[in-house]
Amino acid sequence: MLKNLKYSVIIISTLISMVILPSCNDFLNPEQDLNITQDQLFDDWYEYRAVAMGLYGLQQDLAEQLVVLGELRADLLKVTPNADADLIEIYNFQASKTNKYADPTNLFKLISASNSFIRTLKEKHPEVLDKKAAISNYDKLYGEALCMRAWAYFNAVRIYGKVPVIHESLTSVGEIDEYLNSSSTYVDKINIVFGKDGFHNDTTYNKPITLQKQFYDLDMVIRVFTKQLEEEIKIIDGVPTVGVNHYIDNNDKSWEITVWNTFAWHALLGQMYLTQGDFTKSANHLNAIAFTTSDNYRYQLDQSFALTAWRNIFTGIDSREHIYTLWFNKANQQQNDFQRLFEPFEPHDFMLKPTKVAIDLWETNWRGYNLIINQTKPSLTVLDKNRRGFPADYYRGFGSSYVYAKDGEVLSGSYLNGMLASKMENDYRTATSLMAGYDTVVFKYSINKDRYDQDANFIVYRAGGIQLYLAEVYTWWAFMRNGILSTFTTNAVDIVNDGSNYDPINTRRQLGIRGRVGYTGTYDGLQVGNINYKHNPYTNEVIGYTDLTGNLLAKQLYLEELIMDERGRELAFEGERFYDLIRVAKRRNDPSFLAKKVSAKFPAGQKQAIYNKLLVEKNWYINVFD
């Protein structure tokens, strides 16, 4: 039944509704009202798996919302004149409670569904709680459900600043609605308690309980759910039991990437610990991905997606890069709104586009140049006129992450080179003339797509992102050795530049984040030293320098900025940019970091007001629960 369809809407929408959507309510407004009891389900393995697929169907429904909230509130995406009222509200940090992108409904549906499935597994397969019991696919399903619920809470708290605790006894959206609209307490009148032996027909009883309505902040969500993921999932020989492998049945290797799996478990934990500032625990989980030896070092960065192949990351699902990806497919009526939001071609609406900051990240990223350095007088260092280099991140930028378009046509690469060459000569009149009428377009979700496809995959975790998380960790992770403070900053630089932090005897040659897209010259990588030169972004001429001699903190801050820029080039429009900025601002205890970055995209008459607003941390969140 499940061999050929992922997240099958025919199977899952009905079954998941049977389990978790038994009533209509005002807050969550479920689409179906099916009065089917759980006793009529779960007679065999395929029904368990079908209902588990329902969780992924609900997660699919979150894709556009997560991209809009994670990118439009940051510095690399903005609205166009076509944007609807909901997008404009998000852009201006004025989201109303009726805003469809601010609405927590789909997150609560996912939490409710996870609660229901977790309770069912505990009831009918109590061996999932027995650490001594033999491992089965039910343990792996249990791991998937726990990951899904933790991920939903983590995203919710990053969006709203705080999130109501949806108690595990609340297994329908109707109950959640009553709970959220109650006073400080709520009596759950239907709270089935299961006997330890799992024979629910004669060992369960109904014991109403009073629930205190409470909210978790970010720190509490991370503490509660990292504990659940680390302690409640069985771990055998260091490997968590997460993710059912369907490859044996269907010969489709992409299955292991399109469900929660061992590496995705590590990715979620590594991300949460990094957000919390626990670099040691974060590194432990991220390194389990980055240094895996399975499938020939699958998540280290080599030629697989190098140069022109980088864009192929977004055209399929491949275990060398993808860790956890939400699969969409037009043929199975599983589509999303990315093309509608981003494309300026009929029948799409073109409501969002890249900012100038985003375009400059790629178009002022120079390669192949040389400096004539004056060691004693850095102010006399100049660009080598014979090796000026050339701007443009060819492989990640134009044609992959963005394009220029006018009158339904995409600008050619040679035309773009002419514009960039004009800027190199300070000929902005010609550059402006060449680009007249062209607009910038987000293209990541349109690569190899026909106009009506609307089914680009949504990548939750991939190798490039994990490697950059690790670089961020190594920037700040420090330890005492023989009374001397030691750091891992060279590892951070190596991860980004050339992958030389990895074992050189690996059968796959590592390239690093920048190395795999062709930045391999003397000055093509991140440069962090005592003397750090500043360049004109359009001509590459040296215009000054910063002396950081003897100032480790300043070097770490500078490296962190460079890594954030690199995350922008590598991961723009994939849903994490705003949370990257929040993480850095909170680590620095400096809200002006985020306020300055985000306000820069606004017009002059609005810039200062947005900057002032974002100096207040509360305004980073959508306050629907106040």
Image: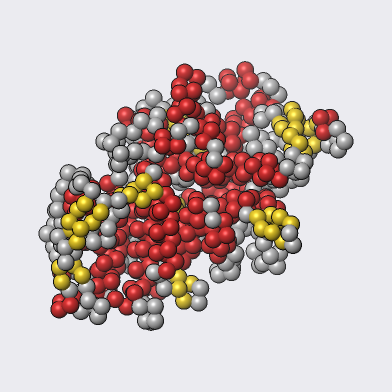
The answer to whether residue 440 is visible is no
Horizontally, residue 514 falls left or right of residue 545, namely left
For the point 60% across and 60% down, which residue is it? 300
* Foreground residue among 263 and 12: 263
Q: Residue furthest left?
A: 35
Q: Quadrant of residue 99?
A: top left
Q: Is residue 235 visible?
A: yes
Percent across and percent down for residue 480 are 69, 59
The percent position of residue 247, horizontal first and vertical second, equals 41, 70
Q: Quadrant of residue 620?
A: top left
> In the rendered view of the protein, which quadrant contains the C terminus?
top left
Q: Could you tell whether 464 is left or right of 426 in the image?
A: left
- Above or below residue 421? Residue 15 is below
Rendered residue at 44%/66% (across/down): 230
Kindly indicate the quadrant of the structure image that contains residue 486. bottom right
Q: Is residue 237 above or below residue 243?
A: below
